Image (cartoon, rainbow, N blue to C red):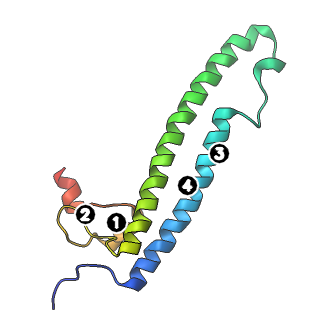
Amino acid sequence: MAEKNRYSDAELQEFKQIILQKLEKAKEDYELLKSAITQSESNDTQDTSPTFKVLEEGAATLSKEEAGRLAQRQLKFIQHLQAALVRIENKTYGVCRETGKLISKERLRAVPHATLSIEAKSRQ
């Protein structure tokens, strides 16, 4: 029997559900990070005593920078998940871009946006 060169439509639907769930959660997390950056829902340093104002502003700046980095990573993750959905529609999802072989189901369940098999990834 010939080696399978793509996942069946039923298998692709299973992966699509996994990706959609992860995408929904990722978007929620991204919105939380965005609101942390803008601090639209929190108190400002205006209501604290002047002695602690400088320290709080410094901490707030660091916190915003960290939230900004996390938001960028989250946005990149969202883009990878959306690209995986496109590959599902094209029926190329789960095919290693280097070896052309199927990526294991276990890897795709753990990292649904993977484009490399473990074999190809370990060669990098």
Secondary-structure class at tag 3: helix
- Which residue in the protein does label 2 denote? 117
Q: In the rendered structure, which disc, 3 or 4, sits on the residue that comes first in sequence? A: 4
Q: CA distance from mark 2 to mark 3?
A: 32 Å
- Which residue in the protein does label 1 denote? 107
Q: In the rendered structure, which disc, 1 or 2, sits on the residue that comes first in sequence? A: 1
Amino acid identity at mark 3: Leu
- Which residue in the protein does label 3 denote? 32
Amino acid identity at mark 4: Ala
Q: In the rendered structure, which disc, 2 or 4, sits on the residue that comes first in sequence? A: 4
Residue 74 coordinates in the image, percent (x, y): 50, 47
Does residue 22 show up?
yes
Q: In the rendered structure, which disc, 2 or 3, sits on the residue that comes first in sequence? A: 3
Taking 58 as reference, is 87 above or below it? below
Q: Which circle marks residue 26 in the picture?
A: 4
Amino acid identity at mark 1: Arg
Q: CA distance from mark 1 to mark 2?
A: 8 Å
Residue 115 coordinates in the image, percent (x, y): 30, 61
Q: Quadrant of residue 34?
A: top right
Q: Dot 2: few (<14), some (14–19), or many (≥20) neighbours within 10 Å?
A: many
Q: How many marks?
A: 4
Q: Dot 4: few (<14), some (14–19), or many (≥20) neighbours within 10 Å?
A: some
| Residue in the image at 81% along x and 12% along y | 49
Taking 26 as reference, is 104 above or below it? below
Q: CA distance from mark 1 to mark 4?
A: 19 Å
